[in-house]
Image (tube, helix red, strand yellow):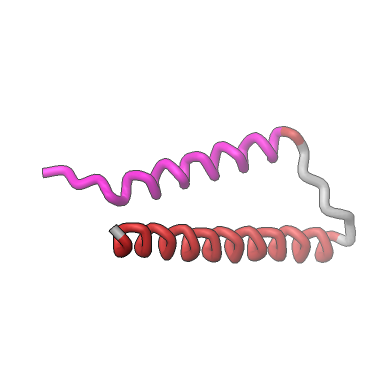
Amino acid sequence: METDRNWKTKAFIVGGVIGALAGVGAAYLLVQQAERKGEPLRIGTGEGVRLGLLVLGLMRQVGRLGDREA
């Protein structure tokens, strides 16, 4: 039972670190793009919705990684 909890904990920690690094990387790219344009960062509603749908699609694909089809 202890090993069962151990791998789950490791999976959550690794997933959290990867997610945090991806988020910081995305923010860095957005800031760099805004600085090149010389404007403050502005994300509109449409862009936010598109980004949210992309993230949901990515999560769906990650969720399917464990599925095995014959």
Q: Residue at x 81, y 65 (%)?
A: 36
Report the magenta residues as a range. Answer: 46-70
Numbered disc total = 0
Image position of 33 (left or right of 25):
right
Task: Name the quadrant containing residue 28.
Answer: bottom right
Q: Which is the main secondary structure of the residues drawn in magenta?
A: helix
Q: Residue at x 39, y 49 (%)?
A: 62
Q: Nearer the viewer, residue 10 or 17?
A: 10
Q: Is residue 52 above or below residue 1?
A: above
Q: Nearer the viewer, residue 49 or 24?
A: 24
Quadrant of the image for the C terminus?
A: top left
In the rendered image, residue 40, in percent from the top left (x then y), is placed at 88, 55
Magenta residue check for 64? yes
In the rendered image, residue 56, in percent from the top left (x then y), is placed at 51, 40
Q: Residue at x 37, y 45 (%)?
A: 63
Q: Nearer the viewer, residue 63 or 7?
A: 7
Task: Name the quadrant containing residue 49.
Answer: top right
Residue furthest to the front in view is 1
In the rendered image, residue 39, in percent from the top left (x then y), is placed at 89, 56
Residue furthest to the right in view is 39
In the rendered image, residue 1, in percent from the top left (x then y), is placed at 28, 58
Q: Nearer the viewer, residue 47 or 61?
A: 61
Magenta residue check for 56? yes
Image position of 9 (left or right of 39):
left
Q: Residue at x 62, y 42 (%)?
A: 51
